[in-house]
Amino acid sequence: MRVLISADWHLGRQGIGGVDLTPYQKELLLSWFLDELVLKLRPEVLIVAGDIFDSKRPSAEALSLFSEFVDAIADLRLPAVFLAGNHDLPELVTYMEGILSRHGLHMISAANWSEKNVIVDLPGLIFLPHLSVYRREGRSMEEILEDLASRYDPANSILITHLTILGSVQEAWDEWEIGFVPIIPANMLRAWKLVVSGHLHGHHMPASNVVYPGSLLKYHPQEKNQKKTVLLVDTETGQWEALSVPQKIDMLEVAGYWDKDHCQFVIEDLYRAPFSDTDFLVLVTLSRPGGDLSLAKGVISALEAEYPGVKFFFGKVHSIAHQLANESSAAPTQTLVKLSPQRLVHRFLQEHNLLESVPIERINDIIGEIFATMEKSHEA
Ligand SMILES: [Mn+2]
């Protein structure tokens, strides 16, 4: 069976600098994906390996894009399986399953999944959605994976999941649940013919039998050099081919500084030349000290003057080269103690590249609860 596997659509995502990426997702899914992948390659099944929506409360635009896509594949009679990731609300996904299943489209989440009862019967394909710690009924991910492997012939099956799979770690890390995804060592999955996972956004292989297709678009500055693909998998052989996803909005790194005397942004280095059929989110590295950070936005007019016809959006000041070089080790600690507890946790998650998977309102709720509990115990 020929199966098309994509992941991490994050429908409704706001990009860095607040740029709405939904129109780009719409163009990509309703034209490129349908024309170049579905119609030309004629896969027998389509799978999305988690993080269908960016938010547990998807925007109206995200929901209508999803319905348009689903209508199109239902018309083509292409069966599909959408797996819930950590960004998806299990109850919403399961509600949609109720509506879509009559069209041969399935949605699997922690709310309707159990390893004893495989919702979708597709030979050689086993699905494991994101299971938060509350949904695991006291079992570790290791136990759940062992149970799955003992029930379904892993040497002849492909596991589709949404996990952090690392080739470099030896032990599973089952995390604490605020949207975090468990870390699984690749060797824990070695019995499977193939494992295709969502969650990590770059196309890569943490082990010879584990592959990530990557997300649809570049969502975070760390993804600036990542390759994004959709996989075409042959379920009998476990062989796959990675098809590059064209980026209609890409990231552009620019180094430069604000020239006070001439009131303009001076571009010192462009890491590559922009080209005209792509829009760019600009990541700025400031090479000289001083000035208001907001002046870095002057980079947009400087780029527009040099590359007419190309659309640029201000993404963010990505790094400050002169500060990084001069900073003493004591300085960051001094700034950190001045931050509110919310900001501290936010900063910690950001530095560990975990922010993407944790909605900030959840962090604030949890910290709020901790402080309320602490105050109560002081009163008592
Ligand atoms: Mn994810």
Image: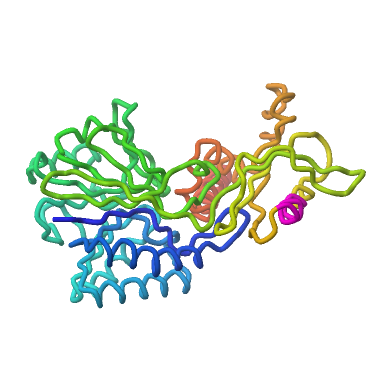
* Residue 174 in view here: no
Image quadrant where one finds the N terminus:
bottom left
Picture quadrant of residue 85: bottom left
Tell whether position 360 is magenta: no
Image x and y of residue 364, in percent: 55, 52
Image x and y of residue 308, in percent: 70, 59
For image coordinates 22% across by 32% down, the residue present is 188
Image x and y of residue 256, in percent: 74, 39
Image x and y of residue 167, in percent: 31, 30
Between 99 and 308, the one nearer to me in the picture = 308
Picture quadrant of residue 276: bottom right
Picture quadrant of residue 208: top left
Q: Is residue 361 left or right of residue 151?
A: right
* Residue 15 in view here: yes
Height in image: 14 above or below 63? above
Image quadrant where one finds the C terminus:
top right
- Residue range in magenta is 298-306
For image coordinates 35% across by 71% down, the residue present is 69
Tell whether position 299 is magenta: yes
Q: Is residue 287 left or right of residue 94?
A: right
Residue ranking furthest to the top: 329
Main SS of the magenta segment? Answer: helix
For image coordinates 45% across by 48% down, the residue present is 357
